[in-house]
Amino acid sequence: MNAILREYFLWRSKFLKPTATLDFREEVRGIKKILAYLPVMERPRAEFIAQKMREHFPNSSTEFLLHPDFSADTSAILGYPAEQIQKNDIGFFKTLRKGVIDKIREKKFDLILDFNFALDLTMAMAFRSCEAPVTVGSYAHPRADRFHSILIKAPDAASYERSMFDYLAQLR
């Protein structure tokens, strides 16, 4: 069933409206509101990401969106507002429910950082629906460009996170 849904979402993504052409340097310099999505990860990685967010975006309002299985102990160390997706927020067809997407969209984030190293179609489609000018994700799938406006290619999750922050620092 998951394979069928995956192929359906990828096929459907061909029909999404193309994203606007942007001057990424200008967009990144003007960022005021950031949403960072954290999949399940160990505490040191979450600490690293929170520290880098403080360093790279000290004047921006940052919120974290957490995977349903994200540890409560780990989320406490972030030092930012965090909301955890609940299992019932994900529908039968592995899509985030409209109410959750609307809630994210209402906040009008300028930047969405998807720290999921593998392409998570549930979250990728939700982030695409939120209409943030810049979404950063992993180049883990050949069709990831349909969902993220900036793709970071890295050999593993730890270097992916470092590479993402290094790239964003170059744009600033």
Image (cartoon, rainbow, N blue to C red):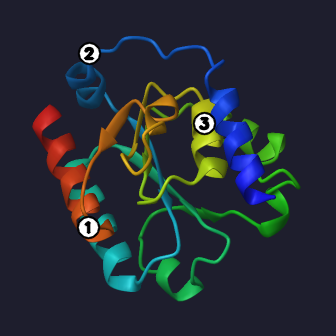
The percent position of residue 152, horizontal first and vertical second, equals 28, 46
Question: Which quadrant, please, contains the N terminus?
Answer: bottom right
Instruction: Name which quarter of the figure residue 149 lies in.
Output: top left
The percent position of residue 53, horizontal first and vertical second, equals 29, 57
Other residues around mark 2 within 10 Å, as few (<14) / some (14–19) / many (≥20)? few
Q: CA distance from mark 2 to mark 3?
A: 22 Å
Name the residue: 74% across, 36% down.
102
* Comes first in the chain, label 2 or label 3: 2
Residue 95: tell me if it is visible: no
Query: Which residue of the protein is positioned furthest toward the right in this rendering?
Result: 92
Query: Which residue of the protein is positioned furthest toward the left in this rendering?
Result: 170
Q: Which mark is residue 107?
A: 3
Name the residue: 48% across, 36% down.
143
Instruction: Please tell me whether mark 2 sits on a helix, a strand or a loop.
Output: loop
Q: CA distance from mark 1 to mark 3?
A: 23 Å
Q: Is residue 116 above or below residue 76?
A: above
| Residue in front for this viewpoint, 106 or 91 | 91
Q: Is residue 64 left or right of residue 9?
A: left
Q: Which mark is residue 65?
A: none
* Comes first in the chain, label 1 or label 3: 1
Q: CA distance from mark 2 to mark 1?
A: 27 Å
Question: For the residue marked with disc 2, what is the amino acid?
Answer: Asp
Residue 72: tell me if it is visible: yes
Q: Is residue 82 left or right of residue 56?
A: right
Query: Badge 1 is on which residue?
Result: 51
